[in-house]
Image: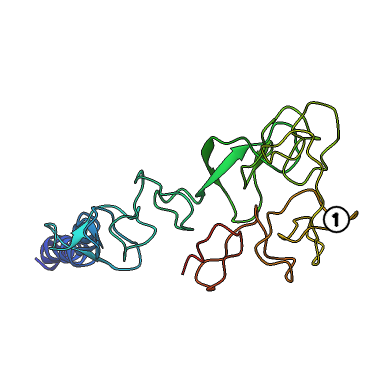
Amino acid sequence: MKNSIIKIILPVTLLITAILIVGPGCTQDNIPWWYKDADGDGFGIYEDRQQASSQPSGYVDNTDDCDDTNANVFPNATEIPDNEIDEDCNGKFAYTFYSDKDGDGFGSPSPIVVEIDNHTTAPNNHSWFAGDCDDNDIAIHPKANEIPNNGIDDNCDGETDVIEYYIDADGDGYGSQQFSAAQGVHNKLDCNDTNNEIHPYTREIPNDGIDSNCDGNDNT
């Protein structure tokens, strides 16, 4: 009799123990995870998650968002150039460049949007700036000296073989509106000839209240 009880009770006890220990774990593993989608763009973040049998309000089944505070930022979103935001969550930033085939630092007029890994380095054969009137000749660009009697607008100022000198007090390669008798640069593009960081064809610094690139807009 004793042996019969042991044979019956022991397996039952082991079975109940297994259900109590293993069963809940299996059940928990089968409950899906949901991830907070605070900005409502359909993409969630891993840091704020919960398990639930059905989808909780405000949660989604993915962790693909890279900024859950901005509904315009999510995988495959439209990338907006020049705002230093990675809208499509691919780890790159879209900027406007200009083709610079001749490598003189100035690009052709047509803008090209390219995604890059950082905020400072232009891709090969591209420039941050337009201004080149002949992108096949490295000697022709806005900072070039005009060469007389060659029939070429060397400095892209719209005037061919016109030699004029302008004072470049800050030495940035761009002249003021003030004529120079014999020495100076061949352009009068500078809007502040006392600061060599202010001139055309430089990158504008947002929200500094300064028109760094002489385009008439301080981008504040």
Q: Residue furthest right?
A: 182
How far across and down, in percent of the image, does residue 199 sit?
67, 59
Q: What residue type is labelled 1?
A: Gly
24 or 181: which is nearer to us? 181
Q: In which quarter of the image is residue 6?
A: bottom left
Asked if residue 82 is positioned above or below residue 98 in the image, the reply reads below
Looking at the image, which residue is at 28% across and 54% down?
43
Looking at the image, which residue is at 79% across and 67% down?
170
Quarter containing the N terminus: bottom left
Looking at the image, which residue is at 30% across and 68% down?
48
64 or 193: which is nearer to us? 193
How far across and down, in percent of the image, does residue 190 sit?
69, 59
Q: Is residue 192 left or right of residue 154?
A: left
Q: Quadrant of residue 18?
A: bottom left
How far across and down, in percent of the image, does residue 76 sit?
36, 43
Q: In this view, does 152 lie to the left or right of 12?
A: right
Q: Name the residue under label 1.
A: 184
How busy is the neighbourhood of tag 1: few (under 14 within 10 Å), some, or many (20 plus)?
many
